[in-house]
Image: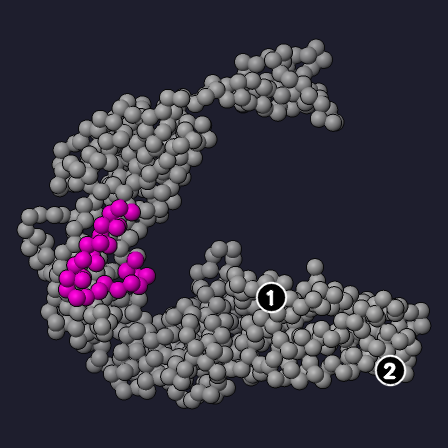
Amino acid sequence: MNTSPLIIELLTEELPPKALNALGNAFAEHIRKTLQDRHLLAPSCTCAVYATPRRLAAYFSAVLGQAPDQSYSEKLMPAAIGLDEQGAATPALSKKLQAKNLSHLTPADLVRRHDGKQDVLYAEGTAPGAVLADGLQQALDHAVTHLPIPKVMQYQLNDGHTNVKFVRPAHHLLALWGDAVVPVHILGLQADRITRGHRFLCQEPLTITSADDWAAVLGNTGHVIPAFAQRRERIARQLAEASAALDATIGTTPEVDALLDEVTALVEWPTVYVGAFEEAFLAVPPECLILTMRLNQKYFPLFDPATGALTHRFLIVSNMQPQDPVHIIQGNQRVVRPRLADAQFFYQTDLKTPLADRVADLAHSVYHNKLGSQLERTERVRKVARWLAPLLGGQPLVAARAAMLAHADLGTLMVGEFPELQGIMGAYYAQHDGEPPEVARALRDQYRIRLDEPVQADTLIAAVLFMAERAETLIGIWGIGLAPTGERDPYGLRRAALGLISAYEQLVAGGWLQANQDSPARLAELLEQAAANFGPGQLARGTVDAVLEFVYERYRNQLAATCDRAAIDAVLALRPPVHQVAARVRACMEFAALPEAESLAAANKRVSNLLKKADGALPDFDRSLLSEPAEQQLADAITQLTPQAQAALQAGDFTASLAILAQARTAVDRFFTDVMVMAEDPRIRGNRLALLKSLHDLMNQVADLSRLAQ
């Protein structure tokens, strides 16, 4: 088996950095799969992915020049359709053979088989294996048209009239199998053995002798590290070394990882340098400085490892490596200073106007043309927050104040420049204005995706505002017909629903709601309160019920990752208060592990089916009509166990309440063995159904146990 390594490289103009890694992986995978499908890759073949700001490439360690001959068996059509009375090919058969590139075959070459119903024609034989040049051409054609391109560009080739589409204009194509050029083409480019190195550090074209030399030549001569992962590791190592030398840290947040990915996609020969700015800028809220450095300049701010405080130094990832980097450092420092000065100006100017004075300006900002202005929305949220706070033990006036100021920072210069700082700047301005600490905390936390810590006394108002805003959003957006569809959810209603769920969970964790008790702050009441603040006819009918169902379905999907699906379904079938769901599911899972659970669940399912068949309302249960020992035993068990189960339920011990049901197994099993429920006598039949209704009520206080039946 004659194999050689293969390298395929497409040189382009600068590719979009946030999409580069995905583009590189997709480019290599599409080529790999096409070559694999054509049997051109040896079993031992490995694939290496390469992506730099100006190139996509893939290397394959063992590729065949021509695939082995392949046996084929193609089912064509019934013989009655493919052959005429003389046995000649019909037009339908000729067309089928042509479509499958088998037009050289005659009816005599075809195989006839009976499939149990009729004779069917098959084309069987051995086809020559694919040639690498053809297979790679097909792979390239497929790859460049199936990349996850954020936005396709259309540009004109050098011939002056041909237009092509790609993510960025392509300038060169390299394709080597061993030391031979593979004659393929794409985007108006013919493959050769020429590549290019670093734009500034290696301006001469590089000639590649063989596929195995490509990466080494780029690295040693071209000053390019072609592998994305290798460049990322080099940058991360240099960042760690530079920050350690300054007794500082760049942090370990998701934002840092995202920035590291982005700068990796911006450089081919990374080198890290240290920059600094005037310490006077540190009087500006650190989030402003961090955002402008990361977002606009792609710098890594440095923090004090002991306190987490922002320092006046930052790290620069450069694509250059001169002997004296002073000009690079000074240039970057000159560039960042005006941006920091702008942030300082915005902050100082914003402080001159109290946050409360900005609320009236929200009347000029449209929230949604069907839902009014931001000021109208603010008033709706304020009413919900004021209603909810005392139910959870908070101060209604403080909650109302937080809701009133929640979006006042939208009109500030800082948020106008950096929308990502909504809420964060509101918290700083509220703190400067002397607002209560709980208000400032609420403004800061209002845009969190979910609450992931138990609610404490100092975060209760924040939780109230968080819940009020999401309830208003869900009701308002859903109510005007903008419910999520498929994968589309432009208003983040799925996220809002999960946020509400997390709030209830953390209120339980913090002790503000008891999972074993009901509460007037239930989700249904919260949504009703939110809906009551919209105008007549503003919302569609049934909005509250639809949103409530939507939240429960989100909770179902969330719990499915860690809990038994049957237990989840059993609990959610009763639609208990959201803050009780998790505890009930855990109890239901413990009950399902008991040896009595399967029998009782099956019995409960049978009871449910019998009750559905009952005609009209059931009579009151009459013990005097009991005649069978088995039904008397069941009645005694229900009488004995009902108060015990209810006492455990009221105490919030869902597990104990379900465990008590296990004691009823013998009586239940005997009842269904010995007693004919649907007796001919209507009084006896009705009384037995009434007895089963009592059993059904007893068994389904925590969950619908019939959902546990196999």
Q: At 65% from the left edge and 70% from the top edge, which residue is drawn?
A: 591
In percent of width and height, residue 125 lies at 56, 18
Q: At 71% from the left edge and 23% from the top edge, which residue is drawn?
A: 114
Q: Which residue is mark 1?
A: 568
Mark 2 Cα shell of 10 Å, populated few (<14), some (14-19), many (≥20) = some
Q: At 21% from the left edge and 58% from the top edge, which residue is drawn?
A: 240
Q: Nearer the viewer, residue 81 or 270?
A: 270
Q: Which disc number belongs to residue 404?
A: none
In percent of width and height, residue 574 lies at 65, 72
In percent of width and height, residue 488 lies at 47, 57
**Dominant SS in magenta:** helix
User: Which amino acid type is shown beneath numbered disc 1?
Assistant: Ile
User: Which amino acid type is shown beneath numbered disc 2?
Assistant: Asp
User: What range is drawn magenta here?
Assistant: 229-257
Q: Nearer the viewer, residue 276 or 366?
A: 276
Q: CA distance from mark 1 to mark 2?
A: 35 Å
Q: Which disc number belongs to residue 622?
A: 2
**For the view shown, which residue lies furthest in the right direction?**
681
Q: At 87% from the left edge and 82% from the top edge, which residue is drawn?
A: 623
In percent of width and height, residue 527 lies at 53, 76
